[in-house]
Image (cartoon, rainbow, N blue to C red):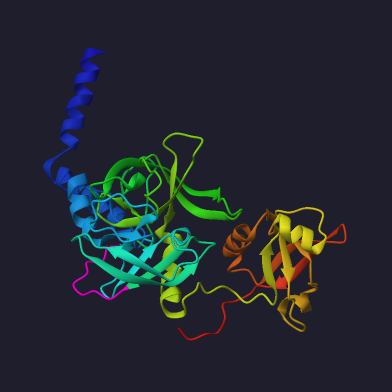
Amino acid sequence: MKVRTIQRSSLCFRFFTIPFLLLLVIALALDGLIAYAEQPIGSVPSREKSLSVPAVVAKVCPSVVTILTRGVPTTLTQAQSGSGFGVIIDESGYILMNNHLVAGIKSLVVGLSTGRLTPGRVVAGDFLLDLALVKIRVTDLVPATLSPSPMLDIGESVVAIGNPLALMGGSTVTVGVVSAVDRSVLTPDGETLSGLIQTDAALNPGNSGGPLVDLSGHVIGINVAIAPSAQAISYAISMEAIDPHIQSMIVRGSVLRPELGFTPITITASIMASFGLESDHRVLALNVKPGGLSAVGGFQNCDIITTVWEHQIYNLGDFWHSLRPSGDQPTLQLTIQRKNAQSTISLQNPSLPKAVL
């Protein structure tokens, strides 16, 4: 057995000649290049997510602003109620932030990273996405680098920038990992936020609107919520969910959504009482347009939508989110409740309004 082993070793040594080794090295190198070339478009290669946390902070902080909605402090180091954060997204002065911070507000004060205070105005808002745009008139702004389609690995490190509890001394930086993606949470208004990034980076009141950043210094989300009954569970709206709506918000002042031929609203306790309904937490179809897409499909006023493509619908956020996977389908399948009876309606898949942006 010992001699046989040595003979086989000798044969193997003769086989692996120098030319073969060179070919093997070249093949492995080409395989690596092909694998790198096949990465999804828009992704940030993992080897580029290699900045240190201080380097990430130095890169992003000039683009982060403080939003003051109540009163004007003499300096940005003073603790201030009614505050949140935002991110400069272009040189012309548009700032992306959370809608719940500025609901019902038109004018506010923006604190730049340089310490300068400047007036701002709310030019767009959407409560379903919890996004708003603020416009300021300042030159020499530093826009953040956004990641429209972040390729995130569970467990990769991320950095959150904000001002928790309006602490004196300016912004606070926390570090965590991506705990999960594509999460959904229920807001205090009874709507659903979808497409969220879950992280264990410490967030507190005051972090709203601040950026969640990967280790390439790219903004991958906007911090929006925490789980109050848990520890180290917080959420950010993914840039993948935000990016398709930014241009519409800039040009139209609102998010562009498909024309349905009716007005969908979440059934709340007050809506239930007003229309004599027996339950809430569904979507009610109102103002069904005669001869429109929905009326032709069989919709009637006060129909209650319970499912879209077998996805349970509890509020308006669920409803709009459920339309996204059906974008390539010619028809839309909805289950409705009418006078204690359920039926299925098939509609032509609605398209975006033909409006020039």
Residue 203 place in picture, x, y as percent? 38, 43
Residue 252 place in picture, x, y as percent? 47, 79
Residue 213 place in picture, x, y as percent? 31, 52
Q: In the picture, which quadrant includes the C terminus?
A: bottom left
Residue 289, relative to residue 285: is it above or below?
A: below
Residue 76, relative to residue 198: is it above or below?
A: below
Q: Nearer the viewer, residue 326 or 206?
A: 206
Q: Main secondary structure of the magenta part?
A: loop
Kindly tell me whether residue 283 is visible in this rendering. yes
Residue 217 place in picture, x, y as percent? 25, 54
Residue 332 lies in the magenta-colored region: no
Residue 140 lies in the magenta-colored region: yes
Give the residue drawn at x 53%, y 54%: 193
Q: Residue furthest left?
A: 18
Instruction: Answer with left or right where residue 268 lies relative to residue 320.
Output: right
Q: Nearer the viewer, residue 115 or 342?
A: 115
Q: Which residues are magenta?
A: 136-146
Q: Nearer the viewer, residue 14 or 201?
A: 201
Instruction: Answer with left or right where residue 86 lies relative to residue 336.
Output: left
Give the residue drawn at x 18%, y 53%: 58
Give the residue drawn at x 79%, y 67%: 302
